[in-house]
Image (tube, rainbow, N blue to C red):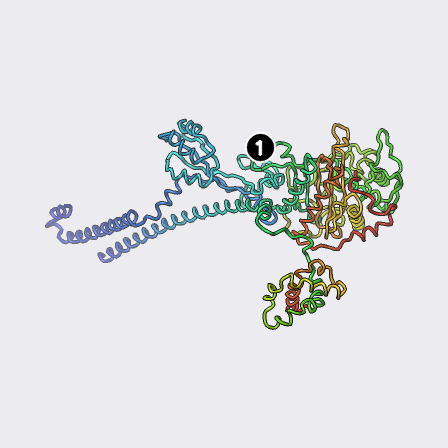
Amino acid sequence: MAENHQDEDFTGHHAASLGTAKVRLAMVAAAFLLGYFAITLRLADLTLLSTPSSPQLAQAQDVRPLAKPLRASLLDRNGEIMAASLAMASLYADAGQIQDAKATAQELAAILSDVSVKELETKLSSGKHFIWLARNITPKQEYAINALGNPALGFQQEERRIYPSERLAAHLTGYTDVDGRGIAGAEKFFEKQLAAGKEPVQLSVDLRVQHILHRELAASMKTFSAKAATGVVMDVNSGEIIAAVSLPDFDPLKPKEASDDEKFNRLTLGVYEMGSTMKLFSTAAALDSGKVGMGAVFDASEPIKYGRFTINDYHAKKRAMTVPEIFIYSSNIGTARMAQALGDNGLKDFYKRLGFFEAVPIELPERGSPLYPKPWRDISTLTTSFGHGIAVTALHLVRATAALANGGTLVVPTLLKGKKSLSPEPEGERVVKPQTSAQIRQLLELVVASGTGSKAGVEGYNVGGKTGTAEKNTGGNYKHDLLLSSFIGVFPIESPRFAVLAMLDEPKPTKESYGYATGGWTAAPVVSRVVEQLAPLYRMAPEEDTRPAVLQAMGKYMKEGIGRASAGTDR
Amino acid sequence: MRKSALIWIMLAVISGAALFHTSQKVTDGRTKLEAIAARTAKESEALRVLEAEWAYLNQPGKLEKLVKQYLDLAPLKGKQFGKVEDFAERTKEAIASALPAPEAEKAPEKPVVKIIPAATPPAVKPAPKRPVEASAAPKPVVKQAPAPAPASNRQFGDLMKSLGVQ
């Protein structure tokens, strides 16, 4: 023993210091003893007493977490999710550690329903140190695989973008690539903000209205065997897009399975010769110039011959007509004469002010540039006045109509929910006088009250609008039976809140429509049904019918009285 | 000297033990924190999944189908909106004559609410026609819904009275 040894060594020499040393030693020994005792206690505590912490350790072991924050969500104006990212587990294996490839493959195949045993077995017996077995598996499958307790299997958290509203707003949300980067729609436009993963992006879209528009457009498309359809609901004062549909559409979850035709955005990318709906703008240009009043008369008795062109009416009245008559009978000749009265660049400048010569500003990467005559000749003024020779997007049309309806302010269409409530004072460039806007509203209501747009009428709500039926220009020729039928509606017409557009591409006539496939028969009913459902949804109380008042006010301009134009005569 | 050494050693041991204890506590705390953070992350991830599923199940198209299949509810229509002024006028003129018999017997005893189930539609059906003719068609609302008029009229009249509307 150490103590005895020391004892012998120091006896006799330093008896006093020996005592001191003994005390010191005892103290040191005591300190060590205390230390050992503490360690013993702690050891007992860790091994015998504290069990609850151990399962946590085992659980957290084999899932590799995500490297970056999850992509932020896209929400609709009511906070409903339009696109969200979820962390989902993907299964990988270290094939070098697999002991019985066949048995493991069978076990896994039973859990992962969509992978074959053979496929798994080849992967598991490959000997590679890292090999993917299944991507984005469900939490249930993850749990079952965990329960196998195979140390050669592991999980990697991966991000998956999902679209709970499926195809409802596919062209607005767009979609992402395999790495979760936005490559179309709002996903692409707001890429930076979404990738940062902090704040969700709240769109102006109302999924309920989106559904109504989608349902009605799809139904009409089916009824009239149309090739495609487009619709927009926009707040005319704030420019917010409440709903926007392009059909046919696709599931943004599986963009690879979608055809190019389905992915094509007919709202903001496709440009079309709109036909008669453009008369709305040429008429507004004429009225706003001050050169033409409501009672002004234009001769529409003879077709206009200009070089090799002849401008004709489909349902010629063969007489002189006032502005409201030209508008509700949708006379090409009359409208062209009216545009002529504006002077050389009158119509061109007006179209330019309405934004018809540049891509429409909207928070989407898919923006189509309009086509218009370059250079602008005299004949261009005549043809573009009734929508021939100028092609714009559906959103151009809605935006310009909103400007004419809201008192004359050209608002900027937006996909982002505004901070203010719906329908604030419109902000933007003034394009027509308030009086012109009031006159246009009267004309729009007249079209629904008596003219080609009667099928857009809704009980309890006063809708105004203009029909359009354009013959499609294929290879330089206008085809008589290939139509682009549309209706642009505004309501409530007295103080407008919403503009609603419905457009059908190549609708075919049916028995029920008496052989017509015009805007008044195909698109106007869609607008009517959308307004009918949208108005109560936004708590808009029904109003008194103002149609009789408008008919009376406009009656003095109508030679043949009111109520002669039918829904089929709107070309 | 010896005593002071003893004190110093004791202090050193005590502070050492205290330090050990504190560092153990910190380690424990950190482990707990990590566990809680992991659980929070897991819960918020679960929340994300549930929210997405909720959004998926709440697709307007899906709800519409379910409502059609299982419920007698329909979306609000423009026709169903009414103006307060219309009701106020109706209560003033029509109510007194609309319910002549039941008011005399039951009104003072029982609360108004109890009357509603008692006034079955067939029993009072002829009643509302009288006031409409007598008061020279006060408002179109009465004409549109003659059957439920007496019961709701009464209830509404009392409501209006209690609100101080004449």
Q: Nearer the viewer, residue A437 or A562?
A: A562
Q: Which element is circle 1 on?
A: helix
Left or right: residue A483 versus residue A141 is: right
Q: Which chain does tag 1 point to?
A: A
Residue A453 falls left or right of residue B26: right
Expressed as whole percent of the image width and height from the top left, the position of residue A242 reads: 65, 46
Question: Which residue position is annotated with label 1?
Answer: A257
| Image location (x, y in percent) of residue A279 | 79, 41
Q: Amino acid at mark 1?
A: Glu
Q: Residues within 10 Å of mark 1 (few under 14, many from 20)?
A: few
Q: Position of residue A390 (x, y in %)?
A: 76, 35
Is residue A514 visible in this depiction of the protein?
yes
Whether residue A189 can be seen here: no
* Residue B153 location, quadrant: bottom right
Q: Work out whether residue A38 or residue A195 is closer to the camera in this orientation and state it.
A: A195
Q: Vertically, is B4 above or below A106?
A: below
Which of these two is toward me, A415 or A20?
A415
Residue at the far left in the pictured view: A12
* Residue nearest the viewer, comparing A215 with B145: B145
| Numbered marks: total | 1
For the N terminus of chain A, the quadrant is top left
Quadrant that contains the C terminus of chain A: top right
- Location of residue B79 in the rendering, given as x and y in whole percent from the top left corner: 69, 54
Q: Quadrant of residue B137?
A: bottom right
